[in-house]
Structure formats: structure tokens, C-alpha cells
Amino acid sequence: MMNLNNLIRKNIKAMKPYSSARDEFKDLKADMVFLDANENPFETTLNRYPDPQQTALKELISKQKELPINQVLLGNGSDEVLDLIVRAFCEPNQDSILTLPPTYGMYGVLAQLNSIENIEVPLSKDFNINVDQVLKQVKPSTKLLFICSPNNPSGNIMDVNAVTRLLKAFDGLVVIDEAYIDFTTIESWTQRLNTFPNLMVTQTLSKAYGLAGIRLGTCYASKEIIAVLNKIKPPYNINSLTQQAAIEALQNNEVSDQVSSILREREKLANALASCFFVKKIYPSDANFILIKVDDANKRYDELLRHGIVIRNRTTQLGCENCLRISLGTPAENKQLLTLLNTLK
Ligand SMILES: *Cc1c(COP(=O)(O)O)cnc(C)c1O
């Protein structure tokens, strides 16, 4: 069974978190004179530090996700959330994480950055989890298991039964990266947080919400896990502009038309790609991109680039030989892509 106390790094268990001026006196709107944070007192709407606990934004997210506020942590993009998770639980030069390549590159980068081993257990040929292999390769030092679903770069959702088996059998923390969840109709793993105390879910406003520029990622987990991350996060990690923009976007919930368009375009593009002679395989996608296998990825990548279209060449990724990843664009952009593809020889 998972014991959270044994997973937290010793120094983090022992440390006393930084207490910012704004942590100690929260309500800037109160009728008080704030001479506590060495800010410039002249009002510009940005002269004050942001709310370190992002209360207004978290209340909104908490309501929309139907989770208590103490099960929500916000980061400067989900990349910061992932970084906090690794630093909270993995002892440098001692612990390990387990990842399932081909997958999102940041997990491996974070392992290297923190000097921890990254145990890689390849996905199957059709990009599913080999549960038996994962359980065989887990070590006593393995604190975290990263599952990306829908997976980047393959685009598929990981089988619910496979993930459930891992949640039950692995006594470390299972981090499910749901950066692309808004493009699917499946239930988010956030719905199962109460069933699995070792489950953590990350999401982001960077993909479906069209807000990659504001850098806002979210983490959902038990209140005990969230408390650990809260203790080590930089005090003002979500700036005021980001908090305001996120509140507006989430209140207005305007992206569903865009997501629908992207999903329609995904089907259109997949169908059109099927008739390109150099496309050997189109992998099923539950995300806003499509992975294809072509005759010669480097050649096709260069051809598109020469005509001003930038896609992602994934040919060096494990199990992705001659694979290209294409993000869905606007209908006009996708049409431009297809027109070009039809001229290739
Ligand atoms: C894009 C992406 C992220 C990064 O999200 P940010 O919130 O922009 O940092 C995380 N995970 C996966 C799988 C991604 O593809």
C-alpha cells in the first residue's frame, strides 16, 4: 500500500515553507494600509503582488471540476506542476521515475535535471501500456509513474483497465498527464481521485483553451499530496495577468466551438491523409494532432518546411520511426497543408 509519508523527500518533510507578506495578510481589498511587501504603492492594477493562493481562480476551477479547493494546485504551465511533483518526491541520486516512451519529453528532462533514474518501459507497437513489464521493472526506489493520456505524440487514450491495474499494484504515485483531455469524451481520471489515494492528474489551459501564452497548468490529487506541493511552490508562481485571464476564459467557456472545429478537422485531415501515397499509417487520435507514418519522415518534413509549413518530426522517438506529428490548424491552414501534400511526389 502507498504510504505518502515515505514518498515525500526528507528535506521537504522537514522544511518550513516561505511565508510571503501576502500569505500573512490576504485581503488586499480590505480597508487597510498595506506597507508590508515593499511594493510601489501607486495604483496601476499591477503594482501589488498576486494572490499566492490564487483563491478566486481556484474556487472557480474547484466548482467546474467538482473537487474541493484543497485538491487543486496551480502551476506556471503544467510543466511547473510536473517539476514540483518530481522535486517533492524524488531524492536526487537515489530515486527513480518510470515513463512509457514514446511520450512527452519533459518527464525525462526532469529526471535528468534532478539526477534521478528514468526507467523507460516502451509502449506496445500500437502505443498501449505493457502492464506486466511496468510492474516487473518498478524498483523500490521508483516513486513516480508517468502516464500521458491521451499520449503525446501518439494521440491515443491509455486503456482504463491497464491504468487501473497500475494504480492498484504500484505503491508510488501515478501521475496521469491529461493535457489533451478536453479533446476527448472520456471521463477524466479526476473522477477517481477518491478511489485511488496515489493518483495525481495534471491538466492545462495551453491546448484546448487556447491559452498557451498565459502559462497555467493544474494538478488534482488528494489534499495531502496537494499540501506537499503547496509547501514547495514558488510563492507567486501564478502572476496577476494569468489569474485574471484564466478567470475570464473559464467563466465564459468560449472554447467549445473551437474544439468542435478542431475535431471535425481532425477527421477530415485523417481521411485526406489516407489517400496520400507516401502515408503508410495514420494512428487514431484523441487529441488535437495526428501522428502518421510516412515513407521517409526526414524528406517529407523538409519538403513541408521548404513550403513554409512546420510540423514535428518524431522519427527519432522510440517506436516512431518515420513518424510525423501534425497539429490541427484552422480550416484554412489545414487546407493549405492538404493542397501541398497533394503536390508531393
Ligand atoms: C503540451 C503538453 C504539456 C505542457 O503543458 P503546459 O501547461 O503548456 O506546460 C504537458 N503535457 C503534455 C503531454 C503536453 O503535450
Image (cartoon, grey):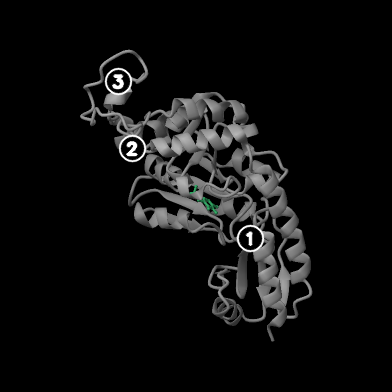
Q: Give the residue drawn at x 50%, y 31%.
A: 72
In three-dimensional space, the C-alpha distance between marks 1 and 3, rounded to whole angstroms, equals 46 Å
- First of labels 2, 1 by sequence position: 2
Name the residue type under label 1: Gly
In three-dimensional space, the C-alpha distance between marks 2 and 1, rounded to whole angstroms, equals 35 Å
Q: Position of residue 205 (x, y in %)?
A: 54, 44
Q: Position of residue 264 (x, y in %)?
A: 75, 55
**CB within 8 Å, label 1 to label 3:** no
Name the residue type under label 3: Glu
Name the residue type under label 2: Pro
Q: Give the residue drawn at x 71%, y 64%.
A: 283
Circle 1 residue: 329
The local secondary structure at tag 2 comes to loop
Q: How many marks?
A: 3
- First of labels 1, 3 by sequence position: 3
* Observer-nearest of 56 and 323: 56
Q: Position of residue 263 (x, y in %)?
A: 72, 53
Circle 3 residue: 24
